[in-house]
Image: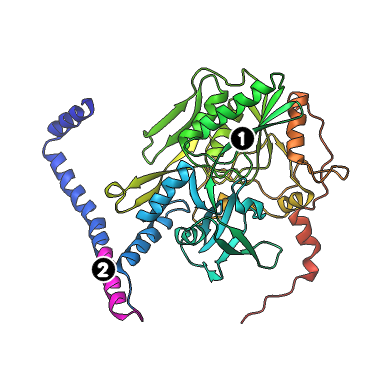
Amino acid sequence: MKKYLLIGVSAFVLGAGSMAYVSSHALASAEPKAKTYRMLGLFGDVLDTVEHQYVTEVDDTKLIQSAIDGMLTSLDPHSGYLNPEDFQEMRDQTRGEYGGLGLEVTSEDGVVKVISPMDDTPAAKAGLKPGDYITAVNGESVLGQSVNDAVKEMRGKPGETVTLTIAREKSDPFDVKLVREVIKTKTATAKMDGEYGVLRISSFGEKTTDEATEAFNGLKAKNPNMKGLILDLRNNPGGLLDQAVGISDLFLESGEIVSQRGRDPRDVERYNARPGDITGGMPIVVLINSGTASAAEIVSGALQDRKRAQIVGLTSFGKGSVQTVIPLRGGMDGALKLTTARYYTPSGRSIQKTGITPDLEVAETKEQAQEIANRAFQFSEASFHNALNAQEGKTRVAPHEPAEAPPEAFDTKKDFQLARAEDVLHYGSVAATPKLPVPTARLASILSKSKVAEVKPPITK
């Protein structure tokens, strides 16, 4: 009410001058509106032309839905339109049960790209990897399709076989046959590895916090002498914000977990921890990699900034934006998935495009170490040409030699990143953990210089 009163007083004092300002302002604001109406008229003309002149009959509803989706996906990679069927499927997925392959995918320049396979699903068992491209489903190309249409073809009745054609870097395209299953996404599991508990969270659905609480309490009851906890968020593609807050809250006694800020600088929403640490102060290490995205990065950033855990692994994906699902006519016309805010860690950093940087960088394999040395971005949010900008002045880490990779004597059947997380728990901190020799990966800049003589001039056709 105070704000409205101040505006009223100002208008009264300014008198005729304020009226002149309002009039000129109204004229100025009418110009962009007129342009918008012209463009809407253009859209109608194009639709009419397609209806009457396209080589076959068209479905107006499908055309308009595709136009809406195209408008939204032009904003950023994570906005889009969900038709009523897609909206229902999304709700089924977040509830934790649907028929499919267990893949989290996105679209990049008209190509379907794997963010992460979900644990214990057909996709994970078949060896699909983050960064794989899906070029065809059952022999039919999905190039140029929206990600929603491609997902429709991959989902369906459990028990049916689906053949995916995969394009993977440094590999010829190959087919993978998978059998659809009812994907019951139990998102949190726990086990002991020596003296330490490992809490694996594969994604953030509606029940994740409850599942994690149950899994940890069960593990602790059976192993009361557990000396530390490893929170494994590798290849976790994210999910629901409230569940990321809930997981963070399990390990924090108080203070901010995350804030989200919209277009208006005053539009800030903060999420704080409540008293009570489920572990009783047990030391924690969080495992992340380039497939750790969105909600998983909120947890990693909160525990890192609040000095509650140390981070081991590789720089995370870098998705620092929040999407709001806005039902249209109660969902009868589907819904908009719209990027409405950026999120910030407790120290005030946005990790959009840049990701969470680990306290101890550890490559899973020597081959992965070489990839990091050769490529600036690998597969990350920064790979998308229309991704939201990073925080001013921030850039993702350039090609470099990762701090550690498995030595020759390490058993390749074991998990090197997990082993180093256990070392950090054993020694008490990253600083106190003895460092391993730097891997022999050669930086891309050195490789390019050594091959200058071999470079041939481009052929123009």
Q: Does residue 296 show up magenta in the picture?
A: no
Q: Which residue is at a point 45% across and 28% down the rendered structure image?
A: 271
Q: Earlier in the sequence, mark 2 or mark 1?
A: 2
- At label 1, the amino acid type is Thr
Does residue 461 lie above or below 190 as drawn?
A: below
> Viewed as shown, does residue 220 lie left or right of 389?
right
- Say which element carries label 2: helix
In front of the other: 436 or 125 = 125
Q: Which residue is at a point 42% across and 36% down the rendered structure image?
A: 261
In front of the other: 61 or 111 = 61
Cα gap from disc 2 to disc 1, whole angstroms = 52 Å
Residue that badge 1 annotates? 189
> Viewed as shown, does residue 290 lie left or right of 345?
right
Q: Position of residue 188 (x, y in %)?
A: 58, 35
Residue that badge 2 annotates? 44
Q: Which residue is at a point 62% across and 58% down the rendered structure image?
A: 132
User: For the residues carrying marks 2 and 1, which lies nearer the camera in this image?
Assistant: 1
Instruction: Give the colouring mode of the picture.
Output: rainbow
Task: Say which quadrant the C terminus sits in.
Answer: bottom right
- At label 2, the amino acid type is Gly
Residue that sits furthest to the front in the current view: 159
- Say which element carries label 1: strand
Query: What predominant SS class does the magenta segment belong to?
Result: helix
Q: Quadrant of residue 14?
A: top left
Q: Position of residue 404 (x, y in %)?
A: 78, 41
Res. 348 visible in picture? no
